[in-house]
Amino acid sequence: MKTFVIRLLRFFKNTVRVTAFLIIVAILLEIWVLWLRPKHYDGNLMMEAFYEQPRNSIDVLCVGSSHTFVDFNTALLWEDYGIPSFVLGGSLQPFWNSYYYIKEACSYQTPKLIILEALACNIEDEYSEHGIVVNNYSGMRWGMNKLEAIRASVSDTDGVIDHSLFFEEYHTRYTDLDINDIDLEMGDEVKTRNWKGFYDYFLTLPLPRPELEDDIDPVPITNKQEYYYRMIIEYCEQEQIPLMIMVSPDAGYNEVAKARYMYAADIAEEYGVDFVDFNSYYNEIGLDFNTDFADIGHLNHEGNRKFTAYLGDYIDEQFDLPDRRAESTDLYDSWEQNAAYIDSRYDNYILKTTEDLDEYIDRLNALPDDYEIYIRISDITWIREQMSKFLGIYGIPFVRPYDEHLYVIRDGSTVVLDADDNGLFTERELGSHRFAANSSGFIFDGNDIVEPGRIGVIVVVLDTYNQCIADSTVIVSDEVHSDAH
């Protein structure tokens, strides 16, 4: 009996050791996966954010290439139409990846409309390059949809095995690791928490407007693209989900692309599915090719708002979708937060690029309570009348040649701060970010916001909601609005 008890105790002891070892290995493996997995907003992080959405909360799902997540403004659809939407896109996404994205998405959500963006009509290769392949499947949870997406994307059995075992996702990532791989919020927790897949492109590139001949005949897309294109249409038909296929406005639009889209439109008509090539509606959308594109293929911050407004009107007219804004439920709170995030980023960009001093001051005065304005006055020899009025409104004296105080305009009131013995006026944490003001200047995440030693009225605008610097500028006698970056 004694021997039996001893053996039993040894057995339990060894079991505990093995179990503890396996738990440690599992934890380390989980950390390894979290750190080494690709972290691109394009494709994989977008899909991962999708899984965080409340069940059955997405009414419109937009799937396709980068045109989706750059052109399709989820904030505007919510604010103007009450449509909770989400974008699942990946750069140069072929139809086979769109197909498995849709199948995966519909196992978690019940969209009332799926919008398929049709750039894949112009993809001729049957297999994408490695980076595009990984981006377009790696965010998916492990299951048959991911496995089938890999099989459709990779040409050989060894490649399928390597991708399926995560080798192609992780094996070279260790040389590229940085702080963003460890910071799971990617330094932007407001976006991560409420993100709906849309990415605002703050660039402007003037481009010529495409002018095409009228006598263009349809040209077939590749057999593989057509196969999955039809699969998407038939899947939506089977699941009784309305489908709209669209071509985004594109400054690179040409005769070859139009011919392929015409072929895809004929297939859509065969199934009785809406197909809209928005390159035929530049005037109706109000697009200006001098101001509304970020590059040859993507709309910018101005263009996506014009396009989404036009698209929203089309959706409102053609599809029977409810307005969720008035519903007394917290199911859609994150769409409200997402809209606030996108709107404030847009406002920050406009503030940063405003050069007229009167307009700039008007924008400062119009900032909501989520903003704080920090002002230092350094060696003023002369000050513009507009700026002196602005300072006077908030009771800030302009002292020559030097003012030792820091002034903070917060909630319409002014707080006067003095430096401590170490020259520090204030410091604070904003999520994963750190902001500080000292006698030498302003610091955000360890970087100088304003070049030390600058003279004039130094203005730093802190966006506390988005946890970022909205703008930093130095206003001096011979410059209306001098960016301090």
Image: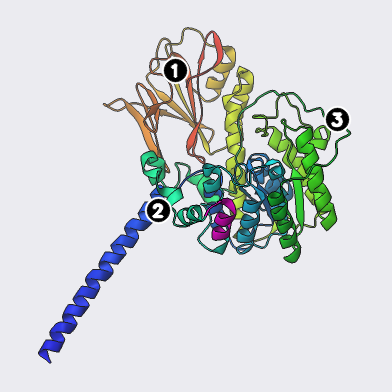
* Residue named by callout 3: 213
Q: Which mark is residue 295?
A: none
Determine the secondary structure under disc 1. strand
Quick one: 395 or 222, which is closer to the camera?
222
Of 228 and 306, the residue lying toward us: 228
Q: Which residue is mark 2?
A: 33
Instruction: Quickly name the residue at label 1.
Output: 377
Quadrant of image for the N terminus? bottom left
In terms of sequence position, does the residue under pointer 2 or pointer 3 come before the other? 2
Amino acid at dot 2: Val
Q: Is residue 247 left or right of residue 145?
A: right
The quadrant in which residue 231 appears is: bottom right
Residue occupying the far right of the picture? 215
Q: Which residues are magenta?
A: 146-156
> Of tags 1 and 2, which is closer to the observer?
2
Q: Amino acid at mark 1?
A: Ile
Within the magenta stretch, is there residue 149? yes
Give me the residue at 72% from left, 34% from top. Answer: 250
Image location of residue 154, percent across then percent down: 55, 51
CB under 8 Å between callouts 2 and 3? no
Given residues 363 and 173, the one toward you in this image is 173
Q: How many marks?
A: 3
User: Which SS type dominates the magenta stretch?
Assistant: helix
Could you tell me which secondary element the residue under label 2 belongs to? helix
Within-10-Å neighbours for mark 3: few <14, some 14–19, many 20+: few
* Residues at circles 1 and 2 in contact by the CB criterion of under 8 Å: no
